Amino acid sequence: MESDNLFDRLADLFRSNGSVNWRLAREIAESVAGESEPVDPWLAEEYRELAATAGMRIAATSPLDPTGKTIDVLAVDRRTWAGNNVEAFSYLAEPVAEKMAGGEGFGSPLQPLGPALIGMQMGSVVGFMSHRILGQFDVGIPAGTETPISFVVPNIEAFAVDHDLDLRQTRLWVALHEVTHHAEFAVPWVKEHFLMLMHAFVEGLEIDPDEISRRMETLQDPESLQRMLDDPSGFSGLLASEAQQGPLEDVRAFMAVMEGYGEYLIERAAPGLIPEAPRIRQAIDDRREEPSQGEQILQQVLGLDLKHQQYRLGAEFCEEVDGRWGDDTLAKMWDGPQMLPTLGELEDVVGWAARVLL
């Protein structure tokens, strides 16, 4: 392999033909994620077995079909997850890169460094995410491409130990969470609708050309470049204004429903299967009180604050709909995007029912 020092390879890595330098992004992501930590084969097999168990349980307790097609399951370390997933968030990076390439005020000689700047930004986001996420759908926002169910084993094991939880029960709880969300996004219209919402959100962002130029100049100074990589807030300030509230609320509502419905299903599936489920749920809630470094970067760079407390609001919405009208009524959410509750309707189940059921 070439030199392990990232800066020894920058001249080569900065070459890019696309709007985003994904090669550089992967290098940054893997560098931030850290050294490889191979997962023992027996442990990887246990995670695959638990995912199969979770799939059968979710299929038996919901209208979703996690067993409808073969599900690839990966048990990986942080570095592998980061390298595998850096391009999965291209739906965030490429529209911003296109704005930089075509917007007014970006005609400087430094403009060719734009793909590197966005690549470094995305690499940092994914690299920092890899240090805390438990699985593929524990990122705050899902991947935009079809990806295997991925368990980030060192993080799951550390989470269980840190909270004095049973290891196998924690692994199974995470498997239920991941399989549930994989099944949600396997519903034919869900991923397309999500990408449409994200496109509307990113379209509303405004880029600050002066700040972009300053960051591009930073790329030419190795010491400043290192500081930018080490500091999770180093890419903030690229936007000239905050995101438009309408598209942001639409994204928040969608993610609250996806995560809330997942929590609702796990609470139905866990009894008798995961005795420690309430303790695991509390530990997850406590963990969400403080966003990860990757989420902080997304919030600072894109204004994408997903407000984790709204995830619980989504679960309470599902529980109340089920309690009032039954799970068959709740299942109508999956008939199409028009059936999803708005952000306001998450606190007004009667208003939602009046709109979609009458």
Image (tube, grey):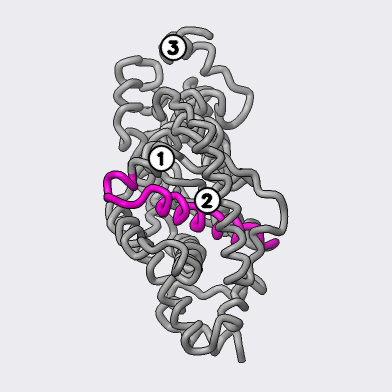
Picture residue at 57% right of the left edge, 53% below the top: 199
What is the distance, in whole Å, between disc 1 and disc 2 at their CAs? 12 Å
Q: Secondary structure at mark 3?
A: loop
The tag earlier along the polypeptide, 1 or 2, is 1
Percent x, y of residue 186:
65, 58
Percent x, y of residue 19:
59, 31
Picture residue at 42% right of the left edge, 49% below the top: 168
State the residue lying farthest toward the right: 69
Q: Please say if 171 is above or below 236.
A: below
Front residue of 81/265: it is 265
Q: Are marks 2 and 3 in contact (CB under 8 Å)?
A: no
Picture residue at 59% right of the left edge, 22% below the top: 16
What is the distance, in whole Å, between disc 1 and disc 3 at their CAs? 22 Å
Snapshot quadrant of residue 64:
bottom right
Q: Is residue 102 left or right of residue 129?
A: right
The residue at which mark 1 appears reads as: 129
The residue at which mark 2 appears reads as: 142
Picture residue at 52% right of the left edge, 35% below the top: 42
The tag earlier along the polypeptide, 1 or 3, is 3
- Pointer 1 local density, CA inside 10 Å: few below 14, some 14–19, many at least 20: many
Q: Please say if 292 is above or below 260.
A: above
Can residue 116 be seen? yes
What is the distance, in whole Å, between disc 2 and disc 3 at their CAs? 31 Å
- Pointer 3 local density, CA inside 10 Å: few below 14, some 14–19, many at least 20: few
Image: magenta residue range: 159-188
Q: Is residue 242 left or right of residue 148?
A: left
Snapshot quadrant of residue 274:
bottom left
